[in-house]
Structures are given as C-alpha cells and as structure tokens.
C-alpha cells in the first residue's frame, strides 16, 4: 500500500516528523518499505506560461521561449519536445536551486541568452518522468509558487501489509492506527447523502447468495466526462502509485484509496437493465477493460445486464470491469456501482486469469461490508462538484442474513496482564481501543469490545491483546523468562525419529532435498501416478497445480538438474508427505522417505576402480536404515510402470508372522530416463516412513558365557531363488540356538551349471545354558540342510 504523507496527515493531524511517522508505522506492524521525499527544495520555482516558442537559429532541437512568470516575461532556451505556446509548466528562475543541488544561473545556449529553466517532473524530484516538461492544468495560476500549487513538499510512503490487515488498504484505515499510536484523533469524514435530482435508476438483482450480499448503484446523467482531473486529486493518485487516466476512472480510484471501497463506473447508455450479480456459467466468455478475452467457469462472479436470452456479462465481479460498458470521453450518463464480495468468492480468481487488480487484492482480503453506500455518496459528490450532472436515487440490494456482523469480544484484565507480562492501565487500554475505532464497554473483570465492521481480523481475546501490545509498544514489554515448571516430552521409544533417519542417510553419503508438495500434473502423468492426485483450487501457478502422490518425481527432477550441471555422482534423499484423493473424504496424507542415486557407487579415489552404482548398493543403504529400527526386509520382484523390468522389487517388512509392504526399490525404466533427459542409470527407492521406523522396545538380555560354534555350508540352488527366502528357511529350521547367519560367498561359473548359483553361508550357534556338543551342532546343521533341500530344491555343494 502506497500513499501520500500529506493525505494521511489530513485524516490524522499529528506533530510527528516524517521520520518519526515512518518509525511509528513500522513499530505498530505496518512495516514501512520505502519513503520517497517529493518536492523538498522547490523554493523559487513558480507556475509559468509559455507565451511564444520560436525555433533556435543555431540548433534544430532547441526553442527560444518567451515565458510569463506572473511578474514579467523572461526569455528561456528550452529543448523539451513538448514546449509550445500556451503550455503552463514549472519555471525555475535565475537564483533558484533544484533538488540535487542544481543552481539556476543566466546562460547563453548557442549564442542565445536564457534566464531560467523550464522543468520536467524528474528535474523537480516529484516523478520519474523526464520525457518533457511537466504539463500543468490550463487554469493553474501563473506566478504562484509551484510547491504551494502542488501541495509540496510531500512524501510517498509504501508499507508492507500482512494479509490480516485488509483495513489498512486505505488512507482512512491507516489513520486509525496512527491516531492510536501518536495519541491524536482521526479527523471526522463528513459524507452527506446526495439528494436525488432525477428519477433515473437501475434495479439490481442478487443471485449469488452469500458471495455478493450487498450491491449499491446510482445513475448520474449529464456528466462532462472530459472534465480534467483536479490537480490535487491527480497528485494524490500519483503519490499513491496510481497513474491518472480520466476523471471518471480517477474518482473511483481516489475513493478506493481514501476509504477502502473498490468501485466501478459504467457508461449508463450501454446498459439496458436490470443489473445482476450471479455465478458464471461454464464456458461463458467476456472481454475485460484491458481488452483481454477470458473464458469463465462456475467459480467466477459476474455482473450482468439485461434478462433472459439478452443477458450479457458487463464485469467480472470483484476483479475488473467489462470493455463494452466502460466509460469514455463520450460518456454523458454514468452508473456508479459499489458492492460487497465475500473474500472466498474472489480469492484466486484474478490469478487464474493471469490478472492482478487493486480491487481483487482488496476483496480477497476483505472489505468493510458497510462501505458501499458511503463510497457511492462520496463519489457522487466529487463528480457533481467537478464534472456536473444530475444524480438519481441511490439503489441498494442486500441479503442481510449473509452480511458479516461484528461480534463482541471479551477482554479480561488478568488475561491481558498474563499474556503481556505487564499491567497496562485501564485508561490506556480504553484509549487505545477507542482510538482504533472499537466500541468499549467496561465490566467487572475487563471489557466487552465490539470491533467495527472493517476489522475482520478481531475475533478472539488474543486479537485484542495483540492490538494493545502493538500500540502500547512492543519495546515497553519486559523481557522475562517464563515461570512455572517446564513439561518435558520424552521421545517415543517405539519409533525411530526423523532426525535419526536423516543422520543415518547423511552417514551413507546422501544429501537431503526439499521439494514442493505441489507439482506439475504432467510430471505425475509421466510417472503414471496421477490417477488419485488432489487438484488445487488456487494454485500458485499452472505448473504447480496438484499435490504430489509420490516423492520420486520431484526428487528425480532435482537429481536431473544436478546431473545437467556436471555433477556425475548424485545421491539425494527426501522425507516428506504425499497426498491421495479419497472420494467423499479429506485427502489421505502419508509420510514417506525416498532416495535416488546415479553415477559411481563410491567417490573417486586411487585405491579402487570406479563402477556404476547398482541395485544392491542402494539395497545395502536401505538395509542399514532398516537395521536402526530392528526391521527385517524382504525384496519381492515387481515391475511398476516407472521401473526397469527385472531390476526392481517391492520392499516388505517381515516381523514374526506379519508382512507389511513398505514400498519399492529398483532401477528406473530407460523410457522414463529418456523423457527426463537423463543419460545415466538411476536407482531409487520410496517407502512409507511410519512402517519402516516402527521398532519394538529394546529389552536387555543375558550374554551367554558359553562358546559359540560355527559351521559353514554351501548350497547349489536355482538362480531364481532369492537369498531372503533361503535365509527365512534357515532361521526357522535352526531354531533358538542360531545366533547369526552370514552369507559370505555367491558364486556362478565353472563347476556350477547354467541357471544355478552357489551360496555359501556360515551358521553361528550358541546356547545360553550349556556348551553345545558336536551332536547338538550336527543335528541343527542336518535339519537346516534338509529344510533348504526340501523347500528350495537345493543340494550341498561338494
């Protein structure tokens, strides 16, 4: 929000200097981003008229001007392209000093004397326009000091507003905060109703329910649309960051900036009536003020004209007016409108069409529902005073049951003191709340406070405490440590926490990635994972329109960006949530962990030859992570659409008699890699984090004091039999005496027929109560051998 300092001081007289005012605004939560001083050193600069302009005899781009100053006529040599006879412009005579320290002296330009300087807005320090002389209105009084005529010096102040302070999108709204903070009072704004002079009116029909609960309008006939915008109004608009366009448009902008109500002016002669407000229909189109043709859907609010088949859209409600009904210099009859739109009906509508308007920005955050009638009366008075015309009656349609109603909030004296840590005097509390425009009623233990209709953000007691704190001064609140016993929350022992998971992955040489939870729908389609994606109603952009159903699309995209920047070995992991749509219910949210790697298995070094990372490298990393939770994983062949056939598996957690599928691990499909523009093979996994990190509470067990015995066995088994299956068979057959099972060799080659492999394993046996005899060990080994041969068709290797 940008505004003129002088304009603000008109609403709230204060003796604070400019620097003090800026510091005060920042201290009360209206952070000042920029203060631009305007016209600070214009002593001596006057309003002047060019009487004649003749071509310079020695220069094609210069003119010799005779300039009337109000106290005589002087000769000025000027190179501005818009210098012409009859133009009224600022003149800095000899002896004047301009902003920046430029002193004006008599001079000769190409042999012709010049006694002063005609100035542009940039040379005067009041605008950035340096294209020519600052053109002043034809009725500007010649000889009057320019600073006096333009209301200078002044400053353009820009503040950054948080979304909850929609009431400060107007000079009047800011004035209440300044009044409370500086101990002053807001000047009354007397806007008297304008009596009707004619009967002309347009009826209004509201068919959008709670989305548009109030709509006010008025017809004004006989308006001079060509009337120039008064210099005081045009300057206030400029200093608020708004470029004046034409008087009728400028009036609506001026009213919006001063009191906060967006408005629109229609050319009455383009409307047949009645005017209506309703939801748009799917596929309807209209042309907006900026000449943009837009296609709408049921989420948009439209303002319509006419009935039945002749009904047409004349404005996009809360965002922008229509092209065909706009006011022009030929307009003679005007229909002014001011409406209240519910924020939920406007949020994101402009962004969906690639638009950002001042009206939409305000309506998205909330506008005072009581302002439309006031805004119409104010704009009417300004139009009548400057452009003439005859007003009709103000017409209003409202749905009172849908209008927001202020609700009283109780503020307890004890609660205020407890939250702030200091006691604020009752008189100060009442002064602050009253200065902010709140209605205050004292009670035995505090106050009953009713916020005005413009303060949507005040709903609970803490909101009132915040108002007291920021106006009383955060710097006046003592810094104290909280009292009372702190409640320590011990981490659960039944789950490995996220920091431990991160440390484990970092220890395995991974870097953590953080990606957006919303992604491009095309990404998910590429992975064939968009079937139950949650579509965002108000996305940041079209490329971030759905919630992710997997972590891998975003993680692999990050890996691809790194690989494209000459990073040959990339190892990334991510912890995050994924989302799936559930019909008739809220989306299901699941926490997952994913990893993606490409390039060499290890960092480059001289002691070991480089080799590409493979499935078993990633599996080892995953097994080490599972070991932190005491989980035993099984890998069962699978081939989802994004996976390389024969080089991927589903990951299952097997604990006792329970088997739980956690996710997937494997190599990505070459077709997907080509689509992602990746040249290297990528190995990845993605698993549900909760299932992976569950763990049983550790129990202390006695260490056996008896020695262990090791027996090695090598089996020849079909290549299709996974080690995990053999491992499970051995553990079941060996019973409680098996302390550890080690696979120390896998062999294929000479001596082993094609299609088979040799697996050599070591069985480490131990008992807690005695030393195992050879007979005991041989019995266990025999049972294991029989079980492996029986269940997997294996045979002992000789």
Image: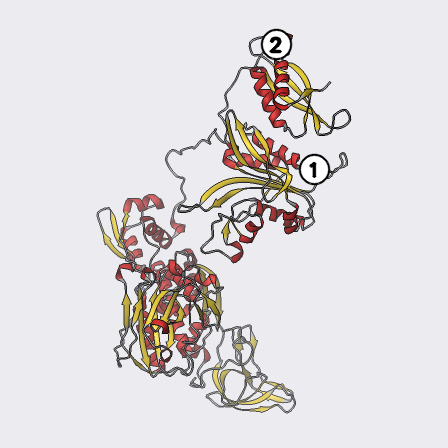
Looking at the rendering, in which quadrant would you find the C terminus?
A: top right
Name the mark nearer the viewer: 1 or 2: 2
Q: Nearer the viewer, residue 408 or 216?
A: 216
Q: Nearer the viewer, residue 563 or 754?
A: 754
**Residue located 70% across and 27% down the image:** 757
Occupied quadrant, residue 481 = top left
Is residue 638 shown left or right of residue 534? right
The residue sitting at the left extreme is: 444
**Is 348 located above or below residue 531 in the figure?**
below
Residue 219 position, x and y percent, is 31, 77
Residue at the disc numbered 2: 776
Looking at the rendering, in which quadrant would you find the N terminus?
A: bottom left
Is residue 201 shown left or right of residue 114? left
Residue at the disc numbered 1: 602
Residue 56 position, x and y percent, is 61, 90
Task: Please say whether residue 773 is visible from this viewpoint.
Answer: no
**Is 283 located above or below residue 673 in the figure?**
below
Labelled disc at residue 178: none
Occupied quadrant, residue 511 = top right
Residue 547 position, x and y percent, is 49, 49
Task: Please say whether residue 497 is visible from this viewpoint.
Answer: yes
Residue 169 position, x and y percent, is 40, 63
Q: State which tag comes first along the sequence, 1 or 2.
A: 1
Marks 1 and 2 sit apart, C-alpha to C-alpha, by 44 Å
Q: Residues within 10 Å of mark 1 (few under 14, many from 20)?
A: some
Is residue 648 shown left or right of residue 393? right
Q: Nearer the viewer, residue 28 or 521?
A: 521
**Residue located 26% across and 78% down the image:** 196
Q: Nearer the viewer, residue 546 or 31?
A: 546
- Disc 2, SS: helix
**Is 446 located above or below residue 209 in the figure?**
above
Image marks 1 and 2: residues in contact by CB distance under 8 Å: no
């Amino acid at each position: 929000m940008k505004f003129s300092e002088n304009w603000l001081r008109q609403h709230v007289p204060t003796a604070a200097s400019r620097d003090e005012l800026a510091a005060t605004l920042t201290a009360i939560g209206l952070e000042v981003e920029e203060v631009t001083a305007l016209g600070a050193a214009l002593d001596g600069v006057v309003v002047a008229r060019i009487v004649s302009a003749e071509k310079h005899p020695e220069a094609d781009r210069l003119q010799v001007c005779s300039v009337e100053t109000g106290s005589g006529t002087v000769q000025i040599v000027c190179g501005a392209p818009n210098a012409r006879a009859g133009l009224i412009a600022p003149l800095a005579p000899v002896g004047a000093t301009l902003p920046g320290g430029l002193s004006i002296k008599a001079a000769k330009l190409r042999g012709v004397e010049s006694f002063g300087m005609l100035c542009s807005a940039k040379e005067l320090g009041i605008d950035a326009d340096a294209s020519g002389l600052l053109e002043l209105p034809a009725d500007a009084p010649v000889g009057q000091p320019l600073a006096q005529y333009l209301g200078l010096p002044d400053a353009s102040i820009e503040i950054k507003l948080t979304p909850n302070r929609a009431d400060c999108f107007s000079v009047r709204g800011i004035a209440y905060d300044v009044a409370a903070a500086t101990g002053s009072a807001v000047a009354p704004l007397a806007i008297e109703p304008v009596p009707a002079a004619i009967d002309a009116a347009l009826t209004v029909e509201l068919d959008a329910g709670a989305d548009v609960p109030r709509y006010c309008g008025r017809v004004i006939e006989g308006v001079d649309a060509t009337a120039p915008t008064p210099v005081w109004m045009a300057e206030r608009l400029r200093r608020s960051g708004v470029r004046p366009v034409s008087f009728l448009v400028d009036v609506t902008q001026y009213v919006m900036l001063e009191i906060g109500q967006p408005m629109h002016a229609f050319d009455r002669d383009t409307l047949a009536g009645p005017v209506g407000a309703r939801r748009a229909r799917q596929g309807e189109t209209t042309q907006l003020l900026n000449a943009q043709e837009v296609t709408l859907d049921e989420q948009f609010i439209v303002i319509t004209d006419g009935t039945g088949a002749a009904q047409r859209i004349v404005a996009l409600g809360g965002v922008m007016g229509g092209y065909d009904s706009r006011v022009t210099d030929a307009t003679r009859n005007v229909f002014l409108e001011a409406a209240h739109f519910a924020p939920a009906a406007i949020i994101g509508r402009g962004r969906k069409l690639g638009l950002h308007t001042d009206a939409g920005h305000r309506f998205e955050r909330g506008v005072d529902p009581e302002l439309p009638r006031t805004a119409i009366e104010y704009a009417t008075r300004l139009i009548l005073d400057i452009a003439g015309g005859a007003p009709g009656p103000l017409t209003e349609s409202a749905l009172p049951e849908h209008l927001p109603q202020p609700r009283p909030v109780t503020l307890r004296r004890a609660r205020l003191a407890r939250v702030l840590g200091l006691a604020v005097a009752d008189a100060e509390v009442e002064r602050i709340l009253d200065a902010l425009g709140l209605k205050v009623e004292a009670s035995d233990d505090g106050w009953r406070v009713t916020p005005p209709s413009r303060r949507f953000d005040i709903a609970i007691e803490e909101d009132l405490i915040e108002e007291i704190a920021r106006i009383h001064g955060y710097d006046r609140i003592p810094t104290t440590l909280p009292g009372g016993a702190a409640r320590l929350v011990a981490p659960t022992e039944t789950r490995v926490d996220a920091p431990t998971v991160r440390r484990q992955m970092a220890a395995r040489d991974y870097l953590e990635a953080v990606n957006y939870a919303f992604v491009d729908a095309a990404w998910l389609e590429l992975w064939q994972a968009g079937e139950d994606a949650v579509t965002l109603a108000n996305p940041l952009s079209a490329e971030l329109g759905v919630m992710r159903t997997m972590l891998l699309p975003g993680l692999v995209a990050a890996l691809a960006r790194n690989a494209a920047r000459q990073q040959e070995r990339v190892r990334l992991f991510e912890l995050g949530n994924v989302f799936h749509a559930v019909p008739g219910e809220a989306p299901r949210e699941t926490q997952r962990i994913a990893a993606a790697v490409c390039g060499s298995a290890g960092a480059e070094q001289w002691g070991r030859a480089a080799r590409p990372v493979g499935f078993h490298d990633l599996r080892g990393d995953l097994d080490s992570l599972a070991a932190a939770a005491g989980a035993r994983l099984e890998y069962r062949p699978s081939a989802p659409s994004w996976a390389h056939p024969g080089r991927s598996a589903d990951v299952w957690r097997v604990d006792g008699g329970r088997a739980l599928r956690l996710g997937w691990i494997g190599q990505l499909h070459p077709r997907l890699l080509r689509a992602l523009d990746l040249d290297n093979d990528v190995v990845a996994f993605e698993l549900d984090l909760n299932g992976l990190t569950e763990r049983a509470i550790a129990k202390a067990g006695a260490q056996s004091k008896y020695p262990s015995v090791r027996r090695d066995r090598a089996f020849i088994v079909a290549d299709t039999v996974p080690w995990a299956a053999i491992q499970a068979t051995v553990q079941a057959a060996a019973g409680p005496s098996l302390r550890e099972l080690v696979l120390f060799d896998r062999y294929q080659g000479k001596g082993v027929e094609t299609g088979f492999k040799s697996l050599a394993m070591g069985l480490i046996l131990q008992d807690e109560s005695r030393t195992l005899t050879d007979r005991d060990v041989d019995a266990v080994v025999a049972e294991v051998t029989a079980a492996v041969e029986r269940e997997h068709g294996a045979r002992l290797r000789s």
